[in-house]
Image (cartoon, rainbow, N blue to C red):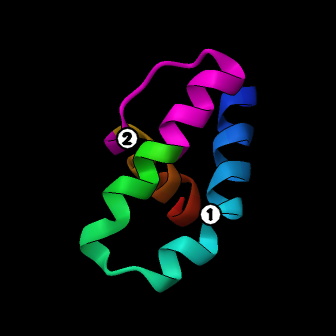
Amino acid sequence: TIEAARESIRLRCENHDNFEFVPNNRHERIWRIIFNQLFLNRGFATYPSQCRKKWYSLKYG
């Protein structure tokens, strides 16, 4: 949904510094946090890898 996409963008922006300051092999953990928040805030069930793929598709069009 559009609201879930907006929420995932907001959550990714909130966690931007976390992505910058941890090694790439720890990014999956941050995506899991975003996934959990998206589920709690919107009831939107997905997987962390889907959140990551959606982010990059929105980012790079």
Say whether residue 43 is magenta. yes
> Magenta part mainly helix, strand or loop?
helix
- The image shows residue 8, relative to residue 19, as above or below, that is above
Instruction: Pick whichever, 31 or 60, lies toward us.
Output: 31
Amino acid type, mark 1: Asn
Label 1 vs 2, first from the N-terminus: 1
Label 1 with label 2: CB-CB less than 8 Å: no
Amino acid type, mark 2: Pro
Q: Quadrant of the C terminus?
A: bottom right
Q: Secondary structure at mark 2?
A: helix
Residue 40 appears in the figure: yes
Could you tell whether 27 is left or right of 51 in the image? left
Report the span colored magenta. Answer: 34-49
Instruction: Pick whichever, 11 or 6, lies toward us.
Output: 11
For this orientation, the residue located farthest to the top is 43
Measured as percent of width and height from the top left, residue 59 is found at 57, 63
Query: At 51% across and 33% down in the image, what residue appears?
Result: 36
Measured as percent of width and height from the top left, residue 55 is found at 51, 53
**Would you identify the image quadrant in which residue 34 lies?**
top right
Q: CA distance from mark 1 to mark 2?
A: 14 Å
For this orientation, the residue located farthest to the left is 25
Measured as percent of width and height from the top left, residue 18 is found at 54, 72
What mark, if any, has residue 48 been given in the picture? 2
Could you tell whether 35 is left or right of 27 in the image? right
Query: At 67% across and 50% down in the image, what residue appears?
Result: 11
Which residue is labeled 1 in the image? 15
